[in-house]
Image (spheres, rainbow, N blue to C red):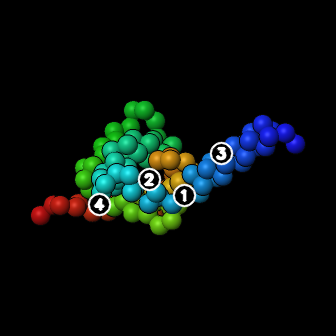
Amino acid sequence: MKRGQKIVITIIIVIGIVVVYLHFAPVSFDASACGGGYKRWVADSHSEGLINLFIEEKGLDKGTNLILMSKPSDIADTVNWNGRDIYATIELEVDGRPFSVSYSGKRYWIEKYAWKIDNIVSGIVIRRGAN
């Protein structure tokens, strides 16, 4: 094998290893780059997608009156992770009826998660920060 071919093969193998590492890296890999603000970033950047997941799960139409009851700081307080798994809870009101929705996500790339709904509790909303 020629020297140039060996270099190309080595580069391809190294790139493959880096891609596999990034795919299987834990959530803390992403969080370490944020300097402590990762929970808030997750709340800010993923809350809309989580709400849409709830709408799809419940089969709600566009005319449904849906209100996000959780402030971003409340959502951030519920965000935690273990390995590649990340968890969050949001509180919604749909047509006057409260819901507490728990989600889990699996990290599959840098700051990318495949979210699913773990639990929906109807009629109970935990108001964080309320007196």
In x, y percent, where is residue 69?
27, 50
Mark 4 surroundings within 10 Å by alpha-carbon count, few (fewer than 14), some (14 through 19), many (20 or more): some
Q: Measure the alpha-carbon separation of dots 4 and 2.
A: 18 Å
Q: Nearer the viewer, mark 1 or mark 3?
A: 3
Q: What residue is drawn where x is 44% and y is 60%?
A: 28
Q: Measure the alpha-carbon separation of dots 1 and 3.
A: 15 Å
Residue 82 in view, yes or no: yes
Residue that label 1 marks: 25
Q: What residue is drawn where x is 27% and y is 49%?
A: 72
Judged from this view, the residue extending furthest toward the bottom is 82
Asked if the residues shown at circle 1 and circle 3 are in contact, with their CB atoms under 8 angstroms apart, the answer is no
Mark 2 surroundings within 10 Å by alpha-carbon count, few (fewer than 14), some (14 through 19), many (20 or more): some
Residue that label 3 marks: 15
In the picture provided, is 85 more to the left or to the right than 68? right
Asked if the residues shown at circle 4 and circle 1 are in contact, with their CB atoms under 8 angstroms apart, the answer is no
Q: Earlier in the sequence, mark 2 or mark 3?
A: 3
